[in-house]
Structure formats: structure tokens, C-alpha cells
Amino acid sequence: MPPGEAIANTLQDEAAQWLAAIVESSDDAIVGKSLEGRILSWNSGAERVYGYTAADVVGRSASILISPDRPDEENVILQEIKNGRRVQHYETVRIRKDGTPVSVSMTISPIRNKDGQVVGASAISRDISDRKRAETQLRASLNEKESLLKEIHHRVKNNLQVISSLLELQIAQIKDPSAIQLFRESQSRIRTMALIHEKLYQATDLARIDFVDYVQSLLRMIMRAQQSTQDVRLDVQCDRVYLGIDTAVPLGLIINELVSNSLKHAFPNGSGRPTITIALNQLQAERYCLLVEDNGKGFSPGFDVERSSSLGLRLVKILGEQLLGKAEWLPGEGARFKLEFSDLYER
């Protein structure tokens, strides 16, 4: 044998020995199988994962590892291998020698001969039982926290409704119409906040609410509370957006103040078909624009919104600043308010 060929053979032998040592020392189960599913090789990692020794299983069908509730799984995998396709990171359950199940992540690859023909399969399995148990515990913990958070929203809503009811009892004792009006306005603000918690309690996402659905419910509530005899048209033009509670509460209060103010002051009797428009549009990924406008009589000449002593308008200004937004009273007919803001949940 020529010296060069002898050296090459020696290097190949050493490489094969190294490969065998690597396979044997792996913590993962590494199993060689024929295309009929017969076990041909079995490393120490496979013994650790499955409990069988090489003497127990070599020459036997790999079906001894298959869970009874997955009878067709091995045939499906072998068919993929015969077609030359690799099955990667496949999570399943196998059965140990003692009959207990073990969760594994498997990668099964075709083994080819020197002519490129598929002659067998190598299956590398990793025990993921600990990870699966941790995932189950985490899922249970999240479900528990979700139930607790729902209960918190439910109780906050109930407590706010109790406060509203207490105000109603107080109103019954008051004779001054202006004082009654102040109590009614406070009631409306409390109900606006309670509605947020009601929506979150009903939602699947406890961090955000569907703001379009909330606005529609809020407007129905405002209209019932105002008991106006006018045929006011509410034009809602809102993108489908989901906002966090820290954004939704002040934004809902702003809409409540502006719509209530329009219903009370914007439309003297006989002023045509009154319309209030509420638009919420998403400008960018985390940037939004709220527009509330009416076609009413607008503000009196010389009226300075920024210096107004009206509690409602002052609240609108304060809440806009709370949202880190840019608020503007736009010129033109009627009253027009614009607020650009970001969802505080994203910050």
C-alpha cells in the first residue's frame, strides 16, 4: 500500500473513532435505524433517556418506544426519510423501558450510502420533560394571574358603580339645580372609568381594550345620561385600535367631556340636524390622532378656551397633557378639538 494511501486510511480511522466517541459521549439519544424501523445503533445517551441498554434494543423494532396513542407516527416519519426529507425539531412523546412517558424533541435525518441512496435514518432525541413541566407550570400560573386580574377589574368596576350610586342618593337630597348638574357630571366621569374596567374584564387581552367598541358603548351611555330630546347624529370614524388602560382612561374622559359639552351647549333648539363626529386614526405605529367636532353654534366671540374656568375644558387640557399629547382647538364652524398622542402602554 502506498504511504500516502496508508496515511489517508489512518486519518479516516482516527476520524471515525473520534466521531464514534462524540456520539457515545453525547447526552442526547442518538439512534441509527434501518428503513424498516429496526434499531441498528444505540448510544449511552439513548440508554439514559429511554432506560434500555444497547443489548436490549439493537435488532429490535423502534416501535417499542412509540406511545400507544401514536401508532402511526413511526411509519409517517420513515416515509419522510425514504423520500429523502429531514424531520427537524419534532416534539413528541416516547415510552421508557419502565413504561413511563418522556417528552422529546427529535431530529431525524436520512443516512445515504456512497451512491447517494437512502439506506437508513439517524434519530437524535433530546429529553425536554423538564421544559414541558416548566411550561405547564408557567401556563397554570399565567391562567391564575389572568383570573386574578379579571377579578380586580370586576371589583374596581363594581366599586365605581357603588360610588355612582352613592352620588345618586346624594343628588336626591339636593334642591339646587346647579349642584345637581355638578354631581351628574361627576357621575358621568365615574361611569366612563367604570366602563373601561368592564371592557377589560370581558376582554381576552387584559392589557388593552378595543377602543372602537369602547367608544361606541361610551357614546350610548352618554346619550342615555343626557336624556336629550334632540335628534343628535353621532358619526364615529375610528380605526380599529387597541389601547392600554393608562391611555384609554384619560382618552375616554376627554371624549366624555367633549361630547357631553356639545350635547348641552352646541345645539339650541331649531338649529338644524346636529352632528357630533368622533374620529380616531392611527398615524404611525404608536402615534394616534383624536378629533372631536360638532356642527353647532361654536364658542361665543372672544371666548378663550385655554383660559376657560370650565372644569370640563380644564380637564380636557390636563388629560391631554397626561397623554403627552399635542392638543389644538381648530378654527371653523362649531367646536373642533384635535389631539395627537402616543399610547402610554408602548413607552
Image (cartoon, helix red, strand yellow):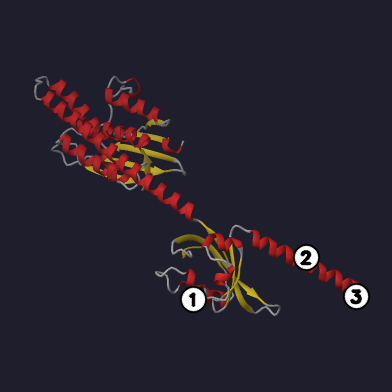
Amino acid under disc 3: Pro
Amino acid under disc 2: Glu
Q: Position of residue 289 (x, y in %)?
A: 40, 39
Residue receiving disc 3: 2
Eye-nearest disc, 3 or 1: 3
Q: What numbered label is drawn on residue 75?
A: 1
Tell me where residue 201 sits by quadrant: top left
**What residue lies at 29% left-to-right and 32% top-to-bottom?**
253
How many angstroms separate mark 2 from mark 1 (CA)?
36 Å
Q: Position of residue 266 (x, y in %)?
A: 23, 32
For marks 3 and 1 on the same chain, the one whose residue lies earlier in the sequence:
3
Classify 294 as above or below 311. Answer: below
Amino acid under disc 1: Asn
**What residue lies at 68% left-to-right and 60% top-to-bottom?**
22
Q: What numbered label is drawn on residue 14?
A: 2
Most foreground residue, 214 or 127: 127
Quadrant position of the N terminus in the picture:
bottom right
Do the residues bearing badges 3 and 1 touch, measured as CB atoms within 8 Å? no
Query: Mark 1 Cα within 10 Å, few/some/many (few <14, many 20+)?
Result: some
